[in-house]
Image: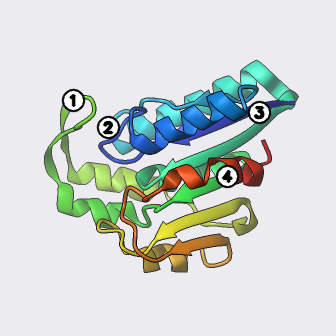
Amino acid sequence: MTSVLLYLHGFNSSPGSAKAQQMAAWVAQYRPDIELIIPAQPNTPAAAWAAIAQTVEEAIARHGDRLKLGVVGSSLGGFMATRVSELYGCRAALINPAVRPHELLCDYLGPQTNPYTDEQYELLPAHMGELRALAVPVTAPERLWILQQQEDEVLDYRKALDEYRFARLSLECGGNHAFVAFERYPAQIVRFLGL
């Protein structure tokens, strides 16, 4: 079997984000046998999903029946990771996941600059429709682990508790949207994903 770990960053983020880099450092040190993929996603939802799906399909084409896929998603990446888990039947760890992002991101409509890449684009109402279309019902909560911090200043953690109520849950007091001290979790995540 070939273990592939897909890490999906959040809205206006990049593979250079702190958690992505912490995961990469852990894999490099402790599990160099894992193929870690941290794709730079396009800034708009349909394009981001197309890139994610292409990445997964390429991994399937490379490894076929030998592929053991696991996915980690942060914030909007958690929303996308839920879709990957449902469509491809793999386990996923969701870090402060966005729930109903088409409602959340309405507050961000207009000109955007990705602080990691300096890319400028416009977030449009049509993109909220794209997010709505990408939502999937959770039918296999046993494949999901939700890592949530209560003091997330961007997302209401209670929405994730409701959305993923039958999944494995680690709820911490304090913290923030970036998920304080994420470096405690990569080993546990890799074990949960079965990689």
Residue at mark 2 to residue at mark 1: CA–CA distance: 9 Å
**182 is higher (above) or lower (below) than 69:** below
Query: Which image quarter: residue 3?
Result: top right
Q: Earlier in the sequence, mark 1 or mark 4?
A: 1
Amino acid type at mark 1: Glu
Q: Nearer the viewer, mark 3 or mark 4?
A: 4
Instruction: Identify the residue position indicated by label 1 in the image.
Output: 119
* Residue that appears at 32% across and 37% down: 43
Instruction: Identify the residue position indicated by label 3 in the image.
Output: 3
* Residue that appears at 49% across and 72% down: 160
Residue at mark 4 to residue at mark 2: CA–CA distance: 26 Å
Residue at mark 3 to residue at mark 4: CA–CA distance: 13 Å
* Residue that appears at 50% across and 42% down: 8
Q: Nearer the viewer, residue 191 or 145?
A: 191
Instruction: Identify the residue position indicated by label 2 in the image.
Output: 43
Q: Nearer the viewer, residue 154 or 19?
A: 19
Q: Is residue 86 left or right of residue 49?
A: right
Q: Earlier in the sequence, mark 3 or mark 1?
A: 3
Instruction: Identify the residue position indicated by label 4 in the image.
Output: 189
Callout 3: SS: strand
Q: Is residue 22 left or right of residue 43?
A: right
Residue at mark 2 to residue at mark 3: CA–CA distance: 27 Å
Give residue 114's position: percent from left, percent from top. Answer: 23, 37
Q: Earlier in the sequence, mark 2 or mark 3?
A: 3
